[in-house]
Image (cartoon, rainbow, N blue to C red):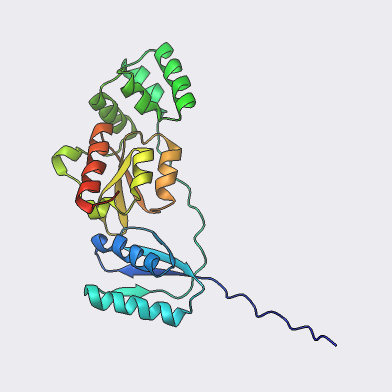
Amino acid sequence: MLTQVDAPPAAKSGHWRITIDARADLVVPLRDYFRRLGVQAEVRGATAVEVETDIPFAEVEEWVDGWSQVNDVPARLEQPVAAPAPRQAPLLKGPRLGELLIRKGFVTEDQLKWALADSRHTGELLGVVLLRRQLIFEDELARTLSDQLMIPYVSLMRIGVNAFVARLLPIEVGERVAAIPVRTSGETVHVAFADPTDSDAVGQVQAILPDIEVCVAELSDIKMAWREVRRVTGAA
């Protein structure tokens, strides 16, 4: 007679948050350290990484302690927490980009309609289409957004970009949505967007970096900054 044997229960996946003290330059290396160990890990803020694994908590804690000692920086592993719910992207007060540019007299209604159709067809941001077709200048776009939305304008060519802070956001995401982290303030990451009125672009960034302050910068400066980040960090 055959005896039925119940299969052992599947290991339960745990979700933890690791916070390091005021060292934004070490967040990406910490994430990559866990990924090399076969653990799902993502950056979640200026000084935090969240991991999800079925490895016991005590073993994860040993890994964190070892990494902390090697890098000589305090790191805290919080007890298991529920996976974070998606947060709503920050709502920017004011009209959409096209309306702003019409008000400023930089484009006509017909030009805007044509550019919106091109944007839907190519999947490019509206600001990218307007610049590519040379309907506006970059400084007109950036400063219009800054003035009308009451958000900071950032001159990336003047202040530069810290490659370690920029890498808080995956390069492929930053290049796709035309955005780049430029500095941190506590747990807040200041992110420069070429088109901060694009809620999808802001939402994609905030899915990775929940606590952001939206800024605006020229598209070409953002692209150039990402190229420099790739060069400095050796990213493919």
In the image, residue 104 sits, relative to residue 82, either above or below, namely: above
Residue 153 in view (yes/no): no
Percent of width and height locating residue 196: 36, 36
Q: Name the residue nearer the viewer: 158 or 91.
A: 158
Q: Name the residue nearer the viewer: 185 or 7.
A: 7
Q: Which image quadrant for residue 76?
A: bottom left
- Report the residue at 35% width, 28% height from top: 128
Q: Name the residue nearer the viewer: 152 or 37.
A: 37
- Report the residue at 26% width, 43% height from top: 226
Percent of width and height locating residue 193: 32, 38
- Report the residue at 38% width, 59% height from top: 44
Q: Which image quadrant for residue 38?
A: bottom left
In the image, residue 145 sits, relative to residue 159, either above or below, namely: above
Single out the residue that lies furthest toward the left.
Answer: 158
Q: Which image quadrant for residue 138?
A: top left
Q: Name the residue nearer the viewer: 141 or 162.
A: 162
Location of the N terminus (image quadrant): bottom right
Percent of width and height locating residue 195: 35, 33
In the image, residue 179 sits, relative to residue 55, either above or below, namely: above
In the image, residue 118 sits, relative to residue 72, either above or below, namely: above
Residue 131 in view (yes/no): yes
